[in-house]
Amino acid sequence: MWGDRRISELVEPVVAALGYELVGVERLSSVGKGALLRIYIDAPSGITIDDCERASHQISALLDVEELMASAYTLEISSPGLNRPLFTEEHFKRFTGVEASITLSKPLNGRREFKGLLRGIRGDRVVILVAGEEFELPLEGIKKARLVPEC
């Protein structure tokens, strides 16, 4: 899982105890306002504002006690939405056959952006079909990945 592993490992049991799935964690820097810590949660029946608020109270208290954030930050709890972020190998397996957009940290064959049909996992690589050509992208090299919503 990319994103913030340390925070993910800390909050996952709290999220699970509340009855949700931890989809992933993003730590984004914000100019002049400290960091934005976005935590995605999901549930079979979907996520409501009340679910986000409930998780926010629990996670915020945990983060304050553990002092993982070195500076001021804003905590945002969110559902994954239609353009669901993909963080783990399991996510890529689960959404095989669905269109996704993947950005790599470093270029592969001169490109960093790939948008196409997820074909699954081969070893430690995500397989994606882009305009009839199959690419194998290293899991550890993925900077960002999201499903592409159907129109």
Image (tube, rainbow, N blue to C red):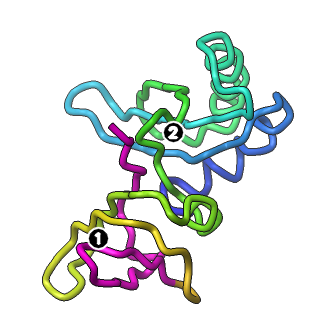
Which residue shows up at 55% across the image and 65% down it? 96
Decide: is 51 above or below 141. Answer: above
Classify residue 93 as left or right of residue 149.
right
Q: Amino acid at mark 2?
A: Met
Q: Which residues are magenta?
A: 125-151
Residue mark closest to the camera, 2 vs 1: 1
Residue found 42% across the figure and 50% down from its top: 147
The answer to whether the residue labelled 2 contacts the one labelled 1, judged by CB atoms less than 8 Å apart, is no
The total number of labels drawn is 2
Q: Is residue 129 magenta?
A: yes
Q: Main secondary structure of the magenta part?
A: strand
Task: Pick whichever of labels 2 and 1 is earlier in the sequence.
Answer: 2
Q: Report crowding for label 1: few under 14, some 14 to 19, many 20 or more residues within 10 A (C-alpha).
A: few
Where residue 140 appears, as percent x and y from the top left, is 46, 76
Residue 105 - label? 1
Left or right side of 2 for 16: right
Read off the residue under disc 2: 69
SS of the residue under disc 1 = strand
Expressed as whole percent of the image width and height from the top left, the position of residue 89 reads 60, 69
